[in-house]
Structures are given as structure tokens and as C-alpha cells.
């Protein structure tokens, strides 16, 4: 994950990889398997329902993508 200064503040970054990194942290650092699986399922659910940023051919912005994952938690 780079800092992407060229798009900073524009709402274009895809937060899903960072969200999945949090799931990895929970699983591998804290042994919280159920919590990690819940986050992964929320991301998978959002993707399955077509939530995509520009990097994946969609039109959702950073906040909309994060909100879609949050709604599925």
C-alpha cells in the first residue's frame, strides 16, 4: 500500500485491501479467527454485490466502498 499522493483527498483509493489487512492482523497477531472471517465475509459480500472502485472497473469512491463493507458487518 503506497501513499498515492497523486490521488490523496480525491476519494479514489480502494480501501478493501487495507480492510483485509486488518482481518489478517486480527487473525495472525491476536488469534481472533471469527472476527477476521467476519471482515473477510463483509468485503466478499460487497464485491459480490458489485461494489467496485475505479481500479476494479467500478465507480464507487473510497467512502462508498468502506461504507459498503461496514454495512455488511
Image (cartoon, grey):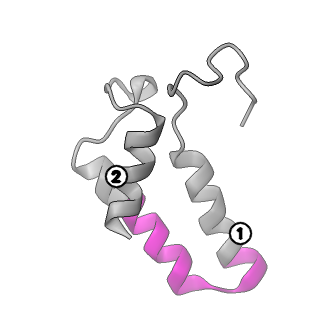
Q: Residue at x 65, y 57 (%)?
A: 21
Q: Compared to 72, does 30 lie above or below?
A: below
Picture quadrant where residue 33 is located? bottom right
Q: Compared to 60, does 66 lie above or below?
A: below
| Spot occupied by residue 17 in the image (x, y as percentages of width and height) | 57, 47
User: Could you give the CA–CA distance between mark 1 and mark 2, rounded to whole angstroms?
Assistant: 21 Å
> What number of labels is visible?
2
Earlier residue among tags 1 and 2: 1
Kind of element beneath mark 1: helix
Q: Compared to 48, does 73 lie above or below?
A: below
**Which SS type dominates the magenta stretch?**
helix
Q: Residue at x 51, y 28 (%)?
A: 11
Q: Which mark is residue 55?
A: none
First to last magenta residue range: 27-43
Q: Residue at x 21, y 49 (%)?
A: 49
| Spot occupied by residue 63 in the image (x, y as percentages of width and height) | 45, 41
| Spot occupied by residue 12 in the image (x, y as percentages of width and height) | 50, 25
Magenta-drawn stretch contains 40: yes
25 left or right of 18? right
Picture quadrant where residue 44 is located? bottom left
| Spot occupied by residue 32 in the image (x, y as percentages of width and height) | 63, 85
62 left or right of 69? right
Kind of element beneath mark 2: helix
Residue furthest out toward the left:
49
38 left or right of 6? left
Nearest-to-viewer mark from 1 and 2: 2
From the image, tell me which residue sits under label 2: 68
From the image, tell me which residue sits under label 1: 25
Amino acid at each position: 500500500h503506497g501513499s498515492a499522493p497523486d490521488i490523496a483527498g480525491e476519494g479514489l483509493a480502494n480501501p478493501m485491501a487495507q480492510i483485509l489487512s486488518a482481518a489478517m492482523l486480527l487473525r495472525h497477531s491476536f488469534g481472533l479467527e471469527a472476527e477476521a472471517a467476519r471482515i473477510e465475509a463483509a468485503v466478499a459480500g460487497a464485491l459480490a454485490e458489485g461494489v467496485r472502485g475505479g481500479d476494479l472497473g467500478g465507480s464507487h469512491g473510497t467512502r462508498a466502498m468502506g461504507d459498503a463493507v461496514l454495512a455488511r458487518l
